[in-house]
Every structure is written in C-alpha cells, then in structure tokens.
Amino acid sequence: MKPIKVDFGGKKKKNMSDGKRIAITLVITLVIAAVLYYLMLPALNFKAIEMYIWIAFSIIIFIGLYGISAGAYSRPEKMAAAKNKMKIPIIILIVMAIIIGIGYLTGAVFFRAKSYSNIIKVQDGDFAEEVAEIDFSSVPRLDKDASNMIATRALGKLSDYVSQFTVSDLYSTQINYQGKPVRVQSLEYGDIFKWMKNTKNGIPAYIIVDMITQNAELQRLDEPMKYSPAEYFNEDLIRHCRFNYPTLMFDTPRFEVDDTGRPYWVVPVVDKTIGLFGGRDITGAILVDAATGKTTLISTNLEGKTKLKTDKFVTDEEYQWLDRVYSAEILNEQFNYYGKYSNGFINSIIGQTDVKVTSSGYNYLALNDDVYMYTGVTSITSDQAIIGFVLINQRTKDARYYQVSGALEDAARTSAEGKVQQYSYKATFPLLLNVSGEPTYFMALKDASEYVKMYALVNVKQSTIVAAESTLADCVEKYAAELQKNGVNVEIDIGNVQDTDNDNNGENTVKYVTVTGTVSDIRTATTGGETYFYIKLDDAATYYKVSVKDAEKIILTNNGDSVTFEIPENAEGNIVTVKSVK
C-alpha cells in the first residue's frame, strides 16, 4: 500500500534573486549613509578628506549588509559568489585609496616647498615708523582665560540666566567694537535638558567684556540667537551652513557682532591650494545672522582672484566691522611655511640658511580698527632670542615682518614673574608695544583665580629692564625711570594712561599700606645680578626686602634711622617685598 501524500496548499520558498538582494541592500545603505551625512557633514568636495571617509564608511556598510543577506558569513560555500558581487565596491575603495595617496603626494612639502613658502606674502616693515606709539588708554589688559572668568562672574549675577545657560569658552572672540578692544562671548545651554527647555526661544543674550576697564556687560537681544554651535539639529551652525553650501569646506566658526551689536557667526571657507590636500588657506567666509539664520558668502579676494561665486568681499566698507576671518592657527602655520621653505626644502634640513619660525605663542593687537595676530620670530638654529616679530591682519592677511633682536616672550614672562616672585603671579602672553620707539612687552600678572593683580612692562632688547606695578600708570612711570637708568632717554606721556576704577578692578588690584619704624638690623644679598637690602624694623620678626635698583638711597640707611615702607596690604611671611621707601 502506497503512502498517502497530503498537500496543505503550501508553496516552496524561493531564494531571493541577486538583483533584488543588491537593490534592497543598496536602499538600506543609502538610508544609513544619509544618517551618517547628517551627523558627519562632509563637504562634497574632492579636496575634503572627510568626503572620502564618508564614502568609505558607506561602501563598507554596503559590503557588510550584502554579505549578511547572501549568507556569506554563515555559509562558507557562498563566500566566493558574494565576493564576486562585491568586486565593484571593493574596486571603488581601492581607487579612492589611490586618489588619496596621489593627492597627498602631489601636495607633499618635499616636492612643493616653494609653493608652500608663497602661500603668504610677507613684507619687511619698520617698527618705529609703521607701528604707532601705543595709546595706553587702549591697551587690552586681559587674556582669554581672565575674560572668561569675568564673563562667568557677570552671568552668575543674573538669576534668570545662570541656571539655564553657561559662558562658552570656545566661542570667545577679541574684536574692535565701537573703537575699543573687547571680547564678545556667546552663551550656550547648560546641558541637554536645558537645551530641550530653551531651544524654542533660543539664546537670549551674549556678554561683552571690555578689555580695558575689565567690565562685563550682558547684552539682552530683542531677537534671540536661534542658530549656534550649541544647537543639535537643523539650527546647528555647521549643519545650517552645510545644507546651504554643500561643496564648501569650513574652518572653526567665530562669534562676532557688528557695530550695532547684532550677533553673527563667521564661518571661514577653506581651500586646499597645493596638490589635493595641501596648502590650507582661507578664500572667504560665510556670515550667518545668529537670529534669523540668513547667510552671506563673502570672498577674501586674494590677489584679485576668487573661486567663490560672489560679488561681496571682506574689504567692502559694509564689512569693516568684521575682524577675524583668518584664524591665528592658520596664519601661524602659513608664516612657518614661509620662514622654513623660502630657500627650498633641502635648506630647511641642511644648512638652514635664513630659516626662521614663530615662537611659542601669539597674541592680538588692535591697529587701525583691525585686529592683528602678533607673534615673535626666532631662528630655527637658536631659540634663545627673537630675531624679529610678525604682525598679520586677521581680516585681509596683510603680513609685515619687523627685524628686532631681543628676548623671547617666555623669557619676558619669566622676568615679569620674577619681579614679583613673592606673589606667585602668572604673566599673560605678552603684547608687543611701541613705547617711545622702544619695542616693549606688556603683560598682565594674574593670581591663581585668574584675577589681574598687577601689570608689567619688559624691554625687548634688554629684558632686565622690568617694571611691575599694581596700576598701569605706576607701571609706565616706573618703566620710563628704568629706561633712563639704563641710558635710554624716552618721553612717555602717562597722562593718557587710564587706570580702571570699577568693580573688577577693585577686586583685582593689589592694595598697599605703609609701615613705619626704626631700623634695628640691616643685611644685604645679591641675587640674579641685583643687590637687595633686608631691613628689620624695631623688634618685629619681619625683614623688608628693598631692591637697590628701585630705591638707590637705601644704601645710606643706618641702624636707628626711621623709615617708612609701602608694602602690599595682605603681605605675610618673614620676608616682605617693599614697593617704595620714604
């Protein structure tokens, strides 16, 4: 008897065709690639390495998904057929790797040293003639860290903001605003939950810190900032720019305000000018209205040429308020190319004739209503002193090199800190000023809490000529006296020196008191080439340290004489440094 076959109406399952499998895998890959694009935001530009990375990730995802759907990883017998189908994406990966390799090779400094040295045009300048004698009433007295501290304190006084927003450390920009140096500082949401609560209304204010008076002022906005790096989705600044300019490459954004106080984001546009990936330069900038998101593309118009399709330029009068198109990092990098490779790549390694590089840091100087990056320049064969310095306009990239021999900025900082070593103050990175024709480093001296306590002036040519005082007027007066002692006759008008008298200054400066007594003991010591008198008054345990260089008449003092010393109000310890002797 034959077995009975029962048909339940089922159909034999068919294998998915390769064409359908590839199509489905491709659709899924495109969806994932779109998500990656939204997160990575690569420029669709053959000079953008990020584009190749995005494409490579997408292809690898396609290969992985196809291998899974074809069962190539679970069933070895199907691996050969799957590899055959994956040849094209693998070939694309190989071709991209070859393009990247050739791109880097054609832009290598070894082959293109002359092109790198010409990426910035540097002219020699005359310091005494071209760098105007400084008006001390406009000297910035804060660095970024001190400015951030003052801005944070100012925000802390506003209860309606402090719980929801913080001061952005990253987006703090020194600019000229209405004729004076300030730092404008954007706010950002305190955390993701505060972003969720406040993003609908945007960021309602920003902070301006006056670099002279050290006052911080919160600017409340009639139109809050809806576009910023603090946002997460389409209002995120870079994402907003990417969707408007998909092929352009961007540098780090900066926060600025125009002359009316309206906030803008400045997003520099980058181009690679040597080979495929070398010779990074700025060809323009995107100005983004922080409130409306309106974008304007402007060109730097270098040498009358531009690759950007725009009839607007940074040199146009309407953009005179714009101060920071070129970052200090790019300008520093480009000057080093000029300094190293002007005489070829081989010379930068062997011989090193006329090879020079920038020093350890940089600062900003306001000149002619523009902001200039300042940095010292030293010989690559000897980094013990500067051989000059460079000023580069951060709006136009106009670069001037000034030949001046003297102390490195770090040496000047050490001299300034050593002058008041008893307080353990730290000097800001120096600003180079023209003081009656004398190149002079200016520094603020800060305590551990970033409060500015004193000011210092150090002569570039003779770093032993140092003045450090609690007020700028006293510091300038002392510096003039030190110059004259060393045979440098100058005429410095201290009438234009504005000493701050405000809430910040009241907390930041050193207050002095006088102490009078009868000399009961005198001792002397020589340190660092300078002679000091250590004088005890009456029966007290304290010795008062007096520099002969600062108070020459102290050598005439004898036991039993009555003297008056001016000392810091909160001075403690067995040895106290004297400010002045009466």
Image (cartoon, rainbow, N blue to C red):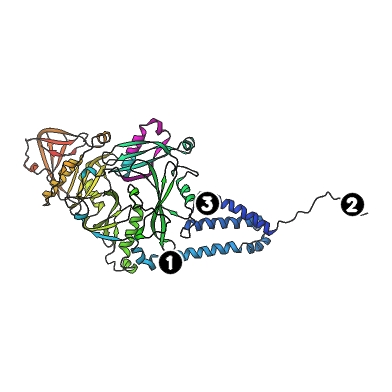
Q: Secondary structure at mark 3?
A: helix
| Residue for badge 2 | 4
Local crowd size for mark 1, using a 10 Å CA cut-off: few (<14), some (14–19), many (≥20): some
Tell whether 54 sits left or right of 454: right
The Cα atoms of the two marked residues, 1 and 3, are separated by 28 Å
| Residue 383 visible here | no
Q: Is residue 165 magenta?
A: yes
Q: Quadrant of residue 533?
A: top left
* Tag nearer the camera, 3 or 2: 3
Estimate the x, y position of residue 456 in percent, counting from the top left.
21, 45
In the picture, the quarter occupied by the C terminus is top left
Tell me the kind of residue under disc 2. Answer: Ile
Tell me the kind of residue under disc 1. Answer: Thr
* Tag nearer the camera, 2 or 1: 1
Vertical side of 218 occupied by 249: above or below: below
| Residue for badge 1 | 106
Q: Quadrant of residue 154?
A: top left
Q: Counting residues from the N terminus, which is met first, the one under dot 3 or under dot 2?
A: 2
Tell whether 439 sits left or right of 305: left
Q: Is residue 429 magenta?
A: no
Residue at position x 57%, y 64% from top?
91
| Residue for badge 3 | 37
